[in-house]
Image (cartoon, rainbow, N blue to C red):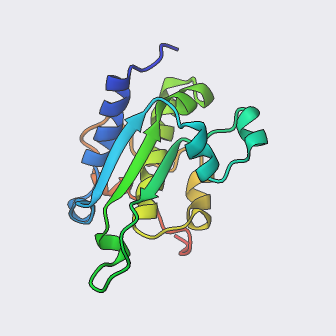
């Protein structure tokens, strides 16, 4: 498979965000979504990986980074600025099939955005474990965007 340039990768990430429902966009004004080639060793350690896991090649596809703010009255977690990083290289390495890569990029963006809305990794397990939790095709711009939101695993369908 031809590897994505950073520009192509960023365009896919941007498209995932653009297709979110307007109600979510209104609640994302304090979120910056960036793309990067790969996480640094320091970021991997901060995400909970051990040196042995990092040396074995373990990585992360994305990170939600809440910006530390002083604890003062009038501030709450959802008003503080947050940063999301989506990493190209680990995704490309683990998903060489172009279709599956696009699905995994989308899953990663939504997973990290879910953290902004207060979801924990345990809440997202069913979503993460599904090979393709989307009913629509990322390439089909006519599909309704509301299917892009992660389903709450605490409530059966």
Residue 25, picture quadrant: bottom left
Residue reaching furthest to the bottom: 73
Residue 12, picture quadrant: top left
Q: Residue 33: horizontal and vertical position, in percent?
A: 34, 47
**In this rendering, is residue 29 above or below 154?**
above
Residue at 40% over, 65% down: 68
Residue at 35% over, 41% down: 34
Residue at 51% over, 39% down: 104
**In this rendering, is residue 15 above or below 151?**
above
**In this rendering, is residue 55 above or below 111?**
above
Horizontal side of residue 117 vs 15, given as left or right: right
Residues 134 and 127: in front is 127
Horizontal side of residue 138 vs 134, given as left or right: left
Q: Residue 74: horizontal and vertical position, in percent?
A: 26, 84
Residue at 30% over, 47% down: 17
Q: Residue 83: horizontal and vertical position, in percent?
A: 37, 53
Q: Residue 137: horizontal and vertical position, in percent?
A: 39, 39
């Amino acid at each position: 498979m031809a590897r994505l340039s950073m520009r192509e990768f960023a365009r896919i990430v941007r498209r995932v965000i653009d297709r979110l429902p307007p109600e979510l966009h209104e609640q994302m004004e304090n979120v910056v979504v960036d793309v990067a080639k790969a996480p640094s060793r320091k970021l991997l350690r901060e995400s909970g990986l051990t040196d042995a896991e990092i040396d074995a090649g373990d990585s992360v596809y994305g990170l939600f980074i809440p910006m530390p703010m002083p604890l003062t009255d009038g501030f709450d977690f959802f008003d503080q600025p947050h940063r999301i990083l989506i990493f190209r290289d680990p995704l490309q390495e683990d998903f060489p099939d172009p279709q599956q890569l696009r699905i995994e990029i989308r899953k990663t963006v939504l997973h990290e955005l879910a953290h902004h809305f207060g979801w924990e990794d345990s809440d997202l397990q069913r979503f993460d474990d599904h090979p393709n939790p989307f009913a629509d095709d990322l390439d089909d711009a006519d599909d309704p965007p509301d299917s892009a939101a992660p389903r709450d695993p605490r409530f059966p369908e």
